[in-house]
Image: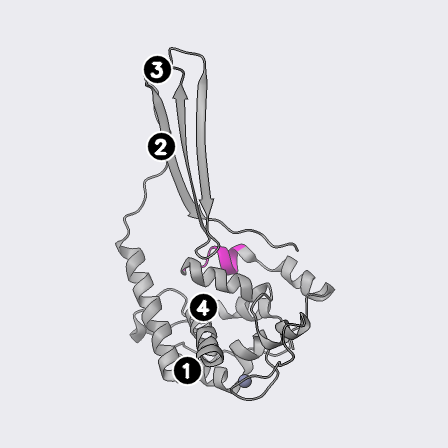
Amino acid sequence: MDSPPDCATSTAMRNFNWMYNVLSLCTSPKIKSFLWRTLSQALPVGATLASRHITSSVKCLRCGGDEDVSHVLFFCPFAQTIWDHAPITSSPSFRRALSTQDKLSEARALLNMPPTGVTIPLYPWILWQTWKARNSLCFQNREFSRIEIISKAVTEARFWQQAQESIPKSLPFQPPQITTPPSEIDIFCFVDAAWTSSSLFGGMGWIFRFGSSRLEVHGTLSRLVFLWPQL
Ligand SMILES: [Zn+2]
């Protein structure tokens, strides 16, 4: 079972290449957020909830095994059938001794089968749909088959990939050119910013106003923003 972070786990997290395996992964912000919570042992699985005295039940609803992150996503017999039938070039041999970080590092080597039409990494979407199916079973008593889960993963990945292809490439940021010198020496700056934990997107806007003149310089910026956990 996964246990609360100990020294070894903290070391594994510290040595984990978060940039390569999560932040720069070509996948949606919600998937990155999910991977982040997975790697931070923040998913509310039975073992985690029991360790926090929220529940005494740590059993997997599908097989009765101890429910920790590795069990739900990799080693539950149901999860294993998903991986065995997923359209990837080889069935991953996730070893139990590996940390979750190492399992996801190894997963980067998995390749998609060409007929899927998905060229972005598919395994994060498989993990995500496996987790969603677990929640549907727990909270709605609704069960999805492995075929449905794999199909949802492929479909969502393909839609997201196509959506990215239709987004015009943003131009590099060009600082505004001030052609008229300000008539006053007083410069006022107005800024505002927001960030949502659900999308992990943050945005900010700013206006510089030069004294009583009507000259203004303004701009906006939005990007994916992760809050680094305490390591
Ligand atoms: Zn199970």
Query: Which disc number belongs to residue 142?
Result: 1
Q: Quadrant of residue 163?
A: bottom left
Query: Which disc number belongs to residue 39?
Result: none
Q: Is residue 185 magenta?
A: no
Residue 230 locus on image (x, y percent): 65, 54
Label 4 vs label 1, nearer the camera: 1
Residue 152 locus on image (x, y percent): 35, 74
* Badge 1 amino acid: Arg
The residue that mark 3 highlights is: 213
For the residue pair 140 and 88, the one nearer the viewer reads as: 140
Residue 130 locus on image (x, y percent): 45, 76
* Badge 4 amino acid: Pro
Name the secondary structure under disc 1: loop
Mark closest to the chain's N terminus, 2 or 4: 4
Q: Dot 3, how many residues are within 10 Å of its Cα: few (below 14), some (14-19), or many (20+)?
A: few
| Residue 98 in sight from this viewpoint | no
Name the secondary structure under disc 2: loop
Cα distance in 3D space between marks 4 and 1? 22 Å
